[in-house]
Image: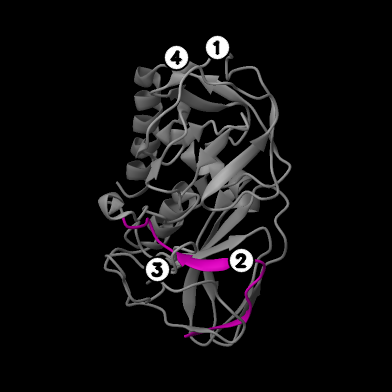
Amino acid sequence: MITVLSPGLLTTVQDLGRPGYAHLGVSASGAADALALRTGNLLLGNPENTPALEMTIQGGEFQFHQDALIALTGSDFGRETWRAISVHAGEIIKLGPTRTGARCYLCIRGGIAAPLTLGSASVHLLTGLGGGRLHRGDSLTIGPEPPRPPLDRLIEWPWQNTGPIRVTAGPQAGWFCQPLDHRTYTVKEDSNRMGLRLAGPTFESTRELLTEGASPGAIQIPPSGEPIILFVEHGTTGGYPKLANVISADLWRLGQLRPRDKVRFQTIPISNALTLLREQEEWLRALVS
């Protein structure tokens, strides 16, 4: 059992979300930095979809009432080696504000035993699916021990959260005369898990779009001309043309963007995007091979 002594700014239970329900208007949601969540779970011997705690900007304070094995991944921990940490019954884990990146994950061997909604424990803040944010005094139950043992070594994090975010051309890229590359944008304060709003050079579309399906990482251009990157709780349809789409291998970087961060983009071929994703997946598989 774990007691929430302080939830920080925004702490929720997240796994890898609930894909497959876009036709019902429900986006997958899930961890904003899925790569950090998956890595933490594999480090502990958990299935990579095991629910963990996602903390945004300001970490929480948690008291463990039983011995546990945990891993802290993401944000400040993204430039270091990651390892499993033993926690004893009665011990308090307190995490302060992030210095680099936006989100930290507290993964626990056995995970958080939370009820499933549409097959997932992830909290979808926009709709209320999966519950809501944690509050002081909430109690969390640790799930059963997984059969696979934890890794008994440090993990070197090889992925860099620097340089341009890589994108492929969107379905309406030809509707814009202005290039996306070589422009600098600032993440706006009103960004959230639904979308990352960017301030900077604007775009003007030569045509209008009827509503069509939308995917995470799509860069939409609304009438204001300032880009919006669709995030994990995005609407499943949209009527704004899509200039580009963040590649799957860089979606985790969106989860680490903070308000006022500077963002640049680089357009690459789909073949390169697939190669980068394959390299990332092979690295994850190598952790448990």
Q: In which quarter of the image is residue 95?
A: bottom right
Q: In 3D space, how far apart are the residues under numbered discs 2 and 4 (Cα atoms)?
A: 39 Å
Residues in magenta? Answer: 1-18
How many neighbours does mark 4 have within 10 angstroms: few (below 14), some (14-19), or many (20 or more)? some
Q: In the rendered structure, which disc, 3 or 4, sits on the residue that comes first in sequence?
A: 3
Q: What residue type is labelled 3?
A: Leu
Q: In the rendered structure, which disc, 1 or 2, sits on the residue that comes first in sequence?
A: 2
Q: Marks 3 and 1: CB-CB under 8 Å?
A: no
**Position above or below: 142 against 282:** below
Say the numbered circle drawn on residue 174. 4
Q: Nearer the viewer, mark 2 or mark 4?
A: 4
Q: Nearer the viewer, residue 145 or 217?
A: 217
Q: Which of marks 3 and 4 is in front?
A: 4
- Where disc 3 sits, the SS reads loop
**Position above or below: 289 against 47:** above
Say the numbered circle drawn on residue 129. 3
Q: Which amino acid does label 2 sit on?
A: Leu
